[in-house]
Image (spheres, grey):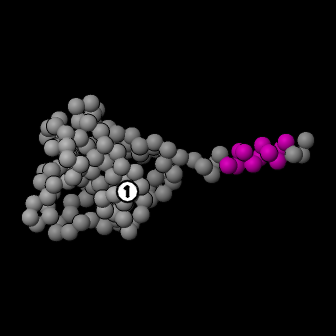
Amino acid sequence: MRYIIYILITLWSQGLFSQTFNLSIAITEIRSTDGEIVIGLYNNKESFPLVDKQYKEITTELKSFSGIYIIEDLPKGEYAVAIFHDENSDMICNTNFFGIPKEGYGFSNNFRPKLSKPDFSDCKIVINADTLINIKLIY
């Protein structure tokens, strides 16, 4: 009997420590339904907002996009989100000569960078429950 109680307590405590949460991202100010929305989720300040260094990358076609995307099963922690509207579907956030995006983009906390890329701390969100954030795209 003692072993059964031990096993039940172990299974119960593992369930408590392995909680995951959902991050819902409402994306607004999308100017057309051409192309895709590319969402980069970062959990590391050294990799933010570098391409191909995301914790998760999601691409969704705008023709079937409802305006909200849900990323499921995220462990508790600090994250930052970077989004761009890939209007020409080339999987690149096209920029001008000065490195300013020519396609729509946005960051968590609706951070608007001035002359350089944002820091993780500017866009950081804490996930410790199901969370909804809003991001307005900048064109």
- Relative depth, front residue between 110 and 15: 15
Quarter of the image where the N terminus is located: top right
Answer left or right for 133 relative to 13.
left
Answer left or right for 51 relative to 72.
left
Relative to 121, is 85 above or below?
above
Range drawn in magenta: 4-14
Percent x, y of residue 25: 34, 44
> Residue lying furthest top in this view?
64
Q: Residue at 65% of width from left, 45% of height from top?
A: 15
Q: Is residue 122 visible?
A: no
- Relative depth, front residue between 136 and 48: 48
Q: Which residue is mark 1?
A: 54
> Residue lying furthest left in this view?
97
Q: Residue at 30% of width from left, 59% of height from top?
A: 51
Percent x, y of residue 125: 39, 56
Q: Residue at 71% of width from left, 45% of height from top?
A: 12
Percent x, y of residue 31: 14, 41
Per the image, label 1 sits on a secondary structure element best described as loop
Q: Is residue 82 visible?
A: yes
- Crowd tier of the residue under label 1, counting other residues whose Cα lies within 10 Å: few below 14, some 14–19, many 20 or above: many
Main SS, magenta region, reads: helix
Tell me the kind of residue under disc 1.
Answer: Gln
Relative to 8, is 77 above or below?
below
